[in-house]
Amino acid sequence: MPVKQAVHFLRTARSIRYYKQELVPRETLAQLLNIGRYPQTGENAQGISYLVVNGREKLHEINELYCRIAQDLPESFPGYKEVKHTVWLQQHYGYDALFYDCSQLILAISDKDLRSWQKNAYFSLTFIALLAPSMGLGTCWLGLLEFLACHPDYMELFAQLVDLPKGKRICGCMLVGYPAVHFRRLVERNPLEIEWR
């Protein structure tokens, strides 16, 4: 692939926050998730698999748990302001500020003893996010959910809710679905900064 085409492809990546309610078929998701096996991983450990949560009802239950935990979250918690703000938006404006009314959630999971669990999950989910538009799909990282679902104090609550296999942990969270919007322009970024020595 020529460099210009490769650069254009990489620049088209967008976070999607508006989704159609139609579920992506399992066969299509399996094809998408398969690309997550191929990026480089720490110590070549790989070790990432996936749990897909389907349906607005299930995602609503996860959102309810998120909001319940947020009620007693200590102010010293990393991401306290972001989590509280997400809950506040939902309580005051009545819209889904966590899942954006998306109907499917990808959870990257690994064995609890995998040392490079988060890095490997991020490598994997990045490949998935890059491939998704080529398949007519959109994705969105869910760092807001990761604050709680990947945290040692709260991960077991989410694990029980989604029936996570024993010995596994949640490493990363990403929405997936058919986009309800299409972007015509590429996103501008801050100018490149480099220091040479």
Image: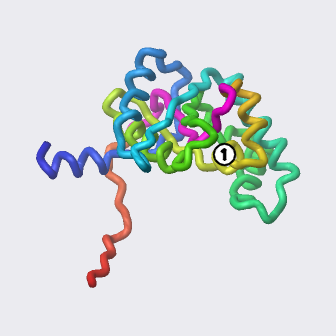
The magenta segment: 165-182
Direction right: furthest residue = 72
Q: Position of residue 58 (x, y in %)?
A: 70, 24
The one nearer the camera, 8 or 65, is 65
Which residue appears at 15% of the width and 51% of the height?
A: 3
Dot 1 alpha-carbon crowd within 10 angstroms: few under 14, some 14 to 19, many 20 or more: many
Determine whether 43 is above or below 196 in the image: above
Q: Position of residue 74 (x, y in %)?
A: 84, 59
Q: Quadrant of residue 193?
A: bottom left
Position of residue 124 in the picture relative to residue 71 (left or right)? left
For the residue marked with disc 1, what is the amino acid? Cys
Q: Is residue 101 magenta?
A: no
Q: Is residue 181 magenta?
A: yes
The one nearer the camera, 171 or 66, is 171
- Quarter occupied by the C terminus: bottom left
Determine whether 176 is above or below 27 in the image: below
Say what secondary structure mark 1 lies in: loop
Q: Position of residue 141 (x, y in %)?
A: 53, 44
Which residue appears at 78% of the width and 36% of the height?
A: 157
Which residue appears at 68% of the width and 38% of the height?
A: 96
